[in-house]
């Protein structure tokens, strides 16, 4: 089944926040933000801005009736700066005017005097200055220190992976409309409608039931709207509250890039120890996460780095630690993979380093250490139904790794200006919010009296196709065509107290709730049919809009059945709650069983480097992926391809740059390069691993949103291997992204003749 949104997307008919029909007299808002990364606000003069014709009012922290401090995990983030600013782009005021144009013009008239304070932009500097968001955490398994002593090989090194801009196509924004009795309705481009509702209530100092948040869909979120959609919605609501008029606030691209956080840059160090037969006996790593100026989701992201620090390998002795470091950058936030990719890059770097030093192909170490059933993760979960070896074997056999390697060798032997490199990238990603209490969802299902169905859940459609999956579930249970099913907007008045659509778990959580509600309704309908047909409910099935008795088609149709149920006064609405069973985690011991299951896969990536220019192309990416039993092959393939491209972008071309003053330099699409149709791999082949799927996955169809992003990590190593083929003096570096500039320097560096 294809994504139900494709039709309106292609025709330009899909609705986003900016498409909402606004009330007459609606005001438009622009955020006035800090033009320094750290400092004391000495004075602000709004008089000229306020006097501009068409400016309605300018709101600051002084206008907040409730709390100014927001933040989902730690309330350490002012909605509007009070006396100090902590990052370049930090909101200070909201300028509300008749038009966005006027508000923007007024912004240029605000005069501010900031006394600058010293700034910190890197995690290392922050750590040295004891500038931390929370206490560092660590996971430990076995006795790493002791194990290192027994290793035949021990290698150490450092890595860096840069941030990444979400670059959702729809920028952040919200529309707030005051209703009667002080109620406010907010249309928001958020992954977390409840986070918006809760925060608006806190900032305004009013009850949550006065706030309704509605989401039609997002033009992409990628984690950037899990928590960071909230401030803009709160600002619009604050202005609507005071003015008793609708207010629209949509960031333009420059404002969005400057004011919002990104994937966390990480500075890390590792120590890896192996036996003669290439078993990794011990692994140590320290991850310094650049959290930016406030907590946001950083502690949770940091936690997931630890969970994925050993990727898909079994390592008996592990000691990994992470620190969320506070810097003067915009607060960094959730981004597809949620800290997992940063952890996985480091173990892959450590393995590449070990292989290089020992003088063997990296894949020999990778293969020798793949997880197996009953292996234990450093956090105490026992691995079951592991597909690490399956996907590896399937990928290397199906795609004939020996032949692929020979092709690369032959090419490199006969070409001097171009070199190829190949890398394998196995992945293992845990499914569930690592914060156990967040793993729940509800679904509200109405069967209308004409037999059509409306479903409300907490699932936010952001392009990942979750609405289509919800539709499929109901269509499957009732055996009716999908045309009879509608997925309603995500709305806090229909489904309350929700977790954000994130952690790749949206389809599992909301799908299981939907399935549960539909099954209850089905049972009721079977009883109605059985009574009418004078058989038992167990003899009844529904198939293609007809009632069947013992597999024999009756004349009784779906719509008649619904009419009959109405006459019998049977409830045609059901609300179901689902909470993932089995999972738990004890943070005091850092042990437990946090994930419902893991998703596995293996990618083989081949790159060609132009050794004159330092540029590169990806010839092919061949993947064996663990979909479980995919319920929607087209959608899932789209997720793998999209995530792969995004992962390759992060690892090889997207380069976020701040200057020494903490100002974002890569503040436009002309200075920030994301993958395009020319830079994605020439060939992408994805085949499913043969498996039974997992009971805790919706219809045994495993979560697919984030895991394939990490195949992109292989792109870094494919390029690195090509550089090695050209320059035998090349000293391995793990400093992502591997931009053409770095490639060029790597191709021509010679540690014997120059410093590098
Ligand atoms: N795919 C599209 N097209 N747009 C998105 O914003 N977000 C990703 C992934 N795939 C995203 C996407 C992220 S970060 C997550 S966590 C999951 O989708 C969320 O949706 P799911 O839980 O339904 O997989
Ligand atoms: N993943 C994604 N988002 C989250 C998580 C997680 O594990 N925890 C809290 N928000
Ligand atoms: Mo995704 S980073 O969990 O929104």
Image (cartoon, rainbow, N blue to C red):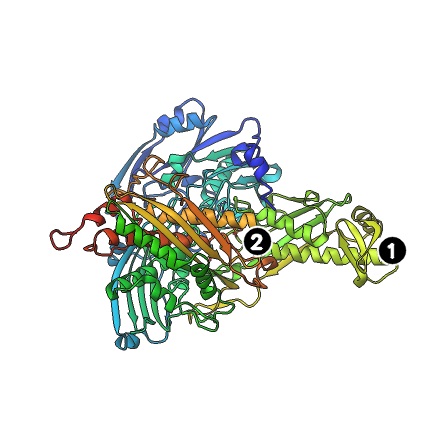
For residue 606, above or below residue 51:
below
* Nearest to the observer: residue 266 or residue 724: 724
Q: Is residue 470 visible?
A: yes
Residue extending farthest to the left is 753
Where residue 279 sits, quadrant-wise, is: bottom left
Callout 1 secondary element: helix
**681 left or right, relative to 152:** right
Label 1: few (<14), some (14–19) or many (≥20) C-alpha neighbours in 10 Å:
few
For residue 253, above or below residue 271:
above
Residue 639 location (% of width, % of height): 50, 49
Which of the marked residues, 2 or 1, is nearer the chain's N terminus?
A: 2
Q: Is mark 2 within 8 Å of ligand 1?
A: yes
Residue 620 location (% of width, % of height): 40, 49
Residue 592 location (% of width, % of height): 47, 70
**350 left or right, relative to 201:** left
Whole-Å distance between the Cαs marked 2 and 1? Answer: 36 Å
Numbered tag placed on residue 507 in the rendering? 2
Q: Residue at x 53, y 36 (%)?
A: 17
Q: Is residue 195 visible?
A: no
For residue 550, above or below residue 678:
below
**513 left or right, relative to 669:** right
Please name the residue that numbered disc 1 is placed on. Answer: 532
Label 2: few (<14), some (14–19) or many (≥20) C-alpha neighbours in 10 Å:
many
């Amino acid at each position: 089944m294809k994504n139900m949104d494709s039709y309106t997307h292609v025709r330009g008919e899909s609705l986003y926040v900016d498409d909402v029909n606004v009330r007459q007299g609606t005001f438009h808002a622009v955020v006035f933000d800090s033009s320094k990364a750290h400092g004391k606000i000495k004075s602000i003069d709004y008089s000229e801005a306020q006097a501009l014709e068409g400016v309605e009012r300018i709101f600051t922290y002084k206008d907040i009736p409730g709390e100014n401090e927001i933040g989902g995990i730690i309330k350490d983030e002012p909605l509007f700066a009070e006396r100090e600013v902590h990052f370049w782009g930090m909101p200070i005021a909201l300028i509300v005017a008749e038009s966005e144009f006027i508000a923007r013009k007024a912004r240029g008239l605000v005069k501010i005097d900031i006394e600058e304070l010293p700034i910190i932009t890197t995690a290392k500097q922050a750590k040295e200055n004891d500038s931390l968001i929370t206490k560092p955490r660590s996971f430990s398994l076995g006795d790493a220190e002791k194990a290192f002593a027994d290793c035949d090989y021990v290698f150490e090194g450092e890595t860096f992976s840069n941030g990444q801009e979400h670059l959702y196509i729809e920028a952040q924004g919200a529309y707030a409309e005051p209703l009667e009795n002080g109620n406010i309705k907010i249309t928001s481009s958020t992954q977390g409608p409840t986070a918006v509702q809760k925060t608006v209530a806190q900032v305004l100092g009013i009850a949550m039931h006065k706030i309704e948040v509605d989401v039609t869909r997002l033009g992409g979120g990628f984690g950037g709207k899990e928590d960071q959609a909230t401030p803009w919605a709160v600002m619009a609501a604050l202005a609507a509250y005071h003015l008793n008029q609708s207010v629209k606030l949509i960031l333009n691209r420059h404002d969005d890039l400057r004011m919002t956080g990104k994937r966390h840059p990480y500075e890390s160090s590792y120590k890896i120890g192996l036996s003669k037969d290439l078993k990794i006996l011990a692994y140590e790593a320290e991850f310094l996460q650049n959290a930016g100026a406030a907590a946001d989701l950083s502690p949770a992201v940091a936690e997931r780095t630890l969970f994925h620090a050993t990727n898909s390998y079994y390592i008996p002795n592990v000691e990994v630690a992470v620190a969320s470091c506070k810097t003067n950058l915009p607060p960094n936030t959730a981004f597809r993979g949620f800290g997992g990719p940063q952890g996985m890059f480091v173990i892959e770097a450590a393995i590449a380093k070990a292989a290089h030093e020992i003088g063997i192909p990296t894949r020999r170490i990778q293969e020798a250490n793949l997880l197996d059933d009953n292996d234990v993760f450093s956090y105490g979960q026992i691995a079951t139904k592991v597909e690490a070896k399956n996907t590896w074997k399937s990928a290397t056999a199906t795609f004939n790794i020996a032949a692929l390697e020979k092709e690369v060798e032959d090419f490199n032997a006969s070409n001097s200006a171009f070199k190829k490199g190949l890398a394998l990238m196995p992945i293992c990603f845990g499914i569930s919010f690592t914060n156990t209490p967040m793993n729940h969802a509800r679904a509200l299902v109405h069967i209308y009296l004409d037999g059509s169905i409306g479903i409300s859940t907490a699932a936010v459609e952001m392009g990942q196709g979750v609405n289509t999956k919800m539709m499929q579930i109901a269509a499957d249970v009732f055996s009716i065509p999908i045309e009879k099913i509608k997925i309603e907007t995500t709305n806090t008045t229909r489904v309350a107290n929700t977790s954000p659509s994130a952690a790749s778990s949206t389809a599992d959580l909301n799908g299981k709730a939907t399935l549960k509600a539909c099954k209850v309704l089905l049972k009721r309908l079977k009883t109605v049919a059985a009574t009418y047909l004078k058989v038992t409910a167990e003899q009844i099935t529904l198939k293609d809009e007809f009632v069947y008795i013992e597999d024999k088609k009756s004349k009784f149709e779906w719509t008649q059945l619904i009419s009959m149920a109405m006459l019998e006064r049977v409830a045609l609405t059901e609300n179901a709650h689902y909470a993932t069973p089995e999972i738990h985690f004890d943070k005091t011991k850092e042990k437990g069983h946090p994930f419902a299951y893991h998703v596995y896969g293996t990618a083989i990536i081949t790159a060609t480097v132009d050794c004159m220019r330092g540029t590169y192309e990806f010839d092919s990416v061949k993947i064996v992926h663990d979909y479980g039993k995919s319920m929607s092959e087209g959608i899932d393939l789209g997720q793998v391809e999209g995530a792969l491209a995004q992962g390759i972008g992060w690892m090889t071309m997207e380069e976020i740059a701040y200057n020494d003053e903490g100002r974002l330099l890569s503040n436009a699409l002309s200075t920030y390069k994301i993958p395009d149709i020319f830079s994605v791999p020439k060939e992408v082949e994805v085949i499913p691993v043969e498996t039974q799927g997992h009971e805790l996955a919706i219809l045994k169809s495993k979560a697919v949103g984030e895991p394939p992003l990490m195949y992109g990590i292989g792109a870094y190593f494919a390029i690195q291997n090509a550089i090695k083929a050209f320059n035998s003096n090349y000293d391995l570096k793990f400093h992502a992204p591997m931009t053409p500039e770095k490639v060029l320097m790597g191709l021509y560096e010679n540690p014997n003749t120059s410093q590098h």
